[in-house]
């Protein structure tokens, strides 16, 4: 119990002890009140201790629950992170393969265009200079 609680209890007990001293007028009355006060204090302490024990049990249970949630959260995020990473790598690989295929098609098209351009150039040359062939 903190000092404020002790002080408050002492203030409540003091008027009772003074009343008993006045009524009884000897040391015996004061001892009875103190004994009664001590018994009340002991009963109160047991109740307080039980309450404290219950609160400590709640704290322990809550701490355990938070710990389990943290662990499951870490596991979940780790699994999610791994899945995310795998999916992102797959997306990247698929996109790169798509672009590489486009590059391949462009090179084939360019090669074909170069061939056609060369044929057209030769045909133009032949058409512009018909007397060279003959």
Image (tube, rainbow, N blue to C red):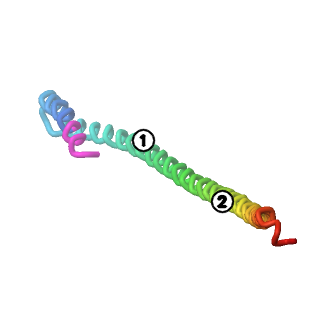
Residue 34 left/right relative to 93: left
Q: Is residue 25 left or right of residue 2?
A: left
User: Is residue 76 something that shows in the picture?
Assistant: yes
The residue shown at (64%, 57%) is 88
Q: Position of residue 68 (x, y in %)?
A: 57, 53
Question: Is residue 114 covered in magenta?
Answer: no
Q: Label 1: few (<14), some or many (≥20) within 10 Å?
A: few
Secondary element at image label 2: helix
Q: Few, some or many C-alpha atoms within 10 Å of disc 2 (few <14, some 14-19, many ≥20)?
A: few
Q: Is residue 15 above or below residue 57?
A: above
Residue in the foreground of this view, choosing between 47 and 83: 83
Residue on which disc 2 sits = 92
Secondary structure of residue under mark 1 = helix
Between residue 1 and residue 55, name the one nearer to us. 55
Q: In the picture, residue 103 is in which quadrant? A: bottom right
Between 21 and 12, the one nearer to me in the picture: 12
* Residue 113 point in image, percent of width and height: 76, 62
> Can you tell which mark lies on residue 51?
1
Q: Which residues are magenta?
A: 1-9
Mark closest to the chain's N terminus, 1 or 2:
1
Q: Is residue 133 above or below residue 57?
A: below
**Magenta residue check for 6:** yes
Marks 1 and 2, how far apart at CA? 60 Å
Query: Quarter-wise, where is residue 91 in the image?
Result: bottom right
Q: Residue at x 80, y 62 (%)?
A: 127
Q: Quadrant of the N terminus?
A: top left
């Amino acid at each position: 119990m903190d000092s404020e609680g002790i002080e408050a209890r002492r203030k409540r007990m003091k008027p009772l002890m003074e009343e008993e001293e006045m009524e009884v007028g000897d040391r015996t009355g004061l001892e009875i009140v103190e004994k009664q006060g001590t018994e009340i204090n002991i009963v109160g302490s047991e109740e307080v201790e039980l309450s404290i024990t219950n609160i400590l049990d709640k704290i322990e249970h809550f701490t355990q629950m938070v710990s389990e949630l943290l662990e499951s959260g870490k596991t979940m995020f780790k699994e999610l992170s791994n899945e995310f990473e795998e999916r992102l790598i797959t997306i990247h690989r698929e996109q790169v393969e798509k672009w590489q295929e486009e590059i391949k098609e462009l090179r084939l098209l360019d090669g074909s265009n170069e061939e056609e351009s060369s044929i057209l150039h030769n045909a133009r040359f032949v058409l512009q200079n018909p007397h060279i062939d003959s």
